[in-house]
Image (cartoon, coloured by chain):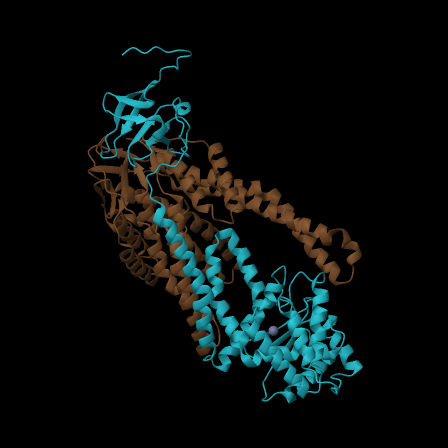
Amino acid sequence: MTTELAGSRGALFWLALKTGLLTVLTLGFYRFWMKTRLRRWYWSAIRPGGHPLEYVGDPVEKLLGFLFAVVVLAFYIGIVNLILMFLSFSLFQDNFAAYTASLVGVIPLWFFAQYRARRYILARTRWRGLRFGLEPGAWGYAGRALWHWALTILTLGILWPRMTFWLEKYKTDRTFFGSARMNQGGRWQMLYPAIIPLVIAAVIGALGTASFNFGEPEVAAGLWVIAAMIALYGFVHYRVVTLRLLTNAKTVNGVSLALSPSPFRVTMIYVLGTLLAAAAVFLPLVILGLLLLTIQSADVLAEVGMEDIVAPIAGAGRYMIIGASVVIYFTIFLLWSALTNVFVTLPVVRHYFSTLTLSPQDGVANIRQRPRDEFAEAEGFADALDVGASL
Amino acid sequence: MTTLRIGRTPETFSTSATYFDGTSAHPVPVSVTVDEEAHALVAHAGADFRWPLSEIREVLDQAGGDQMVIQLATDPVQRLILPDRALEPRLPNRTKRPKVTNRGPLVGWAFAAVASVALIIFVLVPAMANQLARFIPPEGERALGEVTFNQIRSALDQTGLNPVPVCENRAGLAALEKMETRLQDALPEEHGLTVAVLDHDMINAFALPGNYVVFFRGLIDNAQTPEEVAAVFAHEIGHVVSRDPTRHALRSAGSLGVLGLLFGDFAGGAAVLLLAERLIEANYSQDAEAQADVFAHQVLRDAQIAPSALATMFERFRELGGDANPFVAHFLSHPALGDRIQAAVDATPNGFQSVPVLTAAEWRALQSICD
Ligand SMILES: [Zn+2]
């Protein structure tokens, strides 16, 4: 069973622009509706076996989940940070200790939020009328993530594939489609091919450092630039290849999944898509820069007693320029978010899912429905902490 | 049954569709027609249901526009996927929200959430800050003041690149020091103050934790006599002595981040700017301001400076406040400014003998401290 894809760039552009405008006009509150509507669109564009996915999240529950998370985090930030700040200044005479402690305190919460967000999204995703689901286990996930990160850092990245595998297995083995539990097969060692470009980048980087020590700074700089570019590709390569290897080892109800995205293609989409979006916001960005420069230079001239020269842009004129700058700033923000949806997110989603196949043909037909996961907190923590779920 | 129709007969609607019953993943091919009499969508073959047309909702924001996904308003899981949009004109409530999610208690939770955040920001954090301010050691307080001072200097610069400079004209500093000594001698006990003038035209002055007193050049420029500056100086010392700035800075440390949370990515930056401004505005309680005033009156009298100079300065702020500066100085923001002017006048005894604070030359030096 292969996956069909529907939907045009134009329709997505208008949806993103329209909902983005409403978000700006409501001081950000419409963003829960914006995210929900965009998800509905993206989900429905993906049609495995010709049947579209459906996203059934409710923006109001998303808003409330966010408010709930804000209460918890307000308590944390308000009280805990106040005490940390007090201790830090009292004991060390600076705020570095307080910032460090409060940052470290947020890390487990960050993993917790990621798992909870995944649980909410799966609970609100349907295909062929059946709900997906993720079993509770966010603290278990956060604990394992901390442990694996510590191991990865201590081994200078050598155990990174091990972390990727075990964290993915933790999530996959708790994932359901209807009544059927998903299973992550394979071994963590199978992910090692994915880090080859990063190893190459590290070797070239080390060669650069060596030639720097031998008094060849030009050669060193060249090698470092090459290493940095390979490393950039290496991160995308790692993500795409591990995703392929992991997906190919997943089964649900005896059905195996297969995915064959190309890391090179994904990198090109990111690079070219971002460049295209940047080219589109370039002109408004230049205008904004000129306006800000006008305001700035007017201030400077006024300060050195040359107000007469800038009289036309003082007073009312000045506020009009500031108003225009604000409008252009938000235009750039809106265009950028709509264009990155069209030129980056959509092409990447399309590329991934166009390679998704399920076999045997109709092995999922006998799966039954699962009960609704109420989960009133939604993905509030993820929204409040901005854990970087892109959709 | 035979029905006689008068007028135009609606075209008969009939199509094939895919039905998901919401209990199994099995796609059921069905053919559906519209029962014009009963205003219902009827399924034949494969499945057997009648959906009243007014109860049908479309699943919105779908990509493609080729097919149409519909559901029953009261049923969360059943779906019918139609191959085209021909049914659209027959659905009177197509875009209404399905009644499947229960939002009633959620609204209550929303209010509770907003109330808790307000409670944390306006009650819990200030109460704790007031307690902690009493226990912070002097070195800690000093460091807190230093950090805040630098934050304010950076925040006031519009480009955010170079902090507002501190004025260092030697003769001006000497005049300022003379003024400080005069006030210090009148204090009940010695306070090691750090006094600074920032090169900025805001008409304001403020105190920071760790015995900082900071003037803006705008205030010194707009004062007519050195006594007016000395009066403001005494008022700020009043804040220092009662440790208002320390409480305020701790409170800000607690509550500022919370507000940043509430707004998303793009509004977050604006919120931070607003908060930096609030740091300067230093809205102490009405009580704290009144106490600093009373303290200033006493110190000024003891230093043989007429407390009415404070009243003159307040009046000048009020005159200039309208057009001189977009910022509102913390002296101005108070509703009871009139009362404070009256109090400063009343605090000056009849026939009060004042001794000038600075000579004419020293006053000129102070006014050009930023040159
Ligand atoms: Zn005051």
Q: Position of residue A175 (x, y in %)?
A: 26, 45
Most foreground residue, B318 or A64: B318
Q: Position of residue B137 (x, y in %)?
A: 47, 81
Classify A380 as above or below B154. Answer: above
Q: In this orientation, does residue A211 appear? A: no
Q: Colour of chain A?
A: brown
The quarter of the picture where the C terminus of chain B appears is: bottom right
Q: Residue at x 67, y 66 (%)?
A: B202
Classify B8 as above or below B214. Answer: above
Total marks drawn?
0
Residue B342 is left or right of residue B105, and the answer is: right
Residue A107 is left or right of residue B42, and the answer is: right
Q: Position of residue A214 (x, y in %)?
A: 48, 63
**Image quadrant in which you'd find residue A355:** top left
Q: Residue at x 50, y 35 (%)?
A: A14
Q: Colour of chain B?
A: cyan
**Image quadrant in which you'd find residue A51:** top left
The quarter of the picture where the N terminus of chain B appears is: top left
Most foreground residue, B215 or A3: B215
Most foreground residue, A153 or B337: B337
Classify A362 as above or below A68. Answer: above
Most foreground residue, A310 or A68: A68
Q: Residue at x 39, y 42 (%)?
A: A263
Q: In this orientation, does residue B260 appear? A: yes
**Image quadrant in which you'd find residue A269:** top left
Q: Quadrant of ligand 1?
A: bottom right
Q: Position of residue A25 (x, y in %)?
A: 53, 45
Residue A340 is left or right of residue B159, and the answer is: left
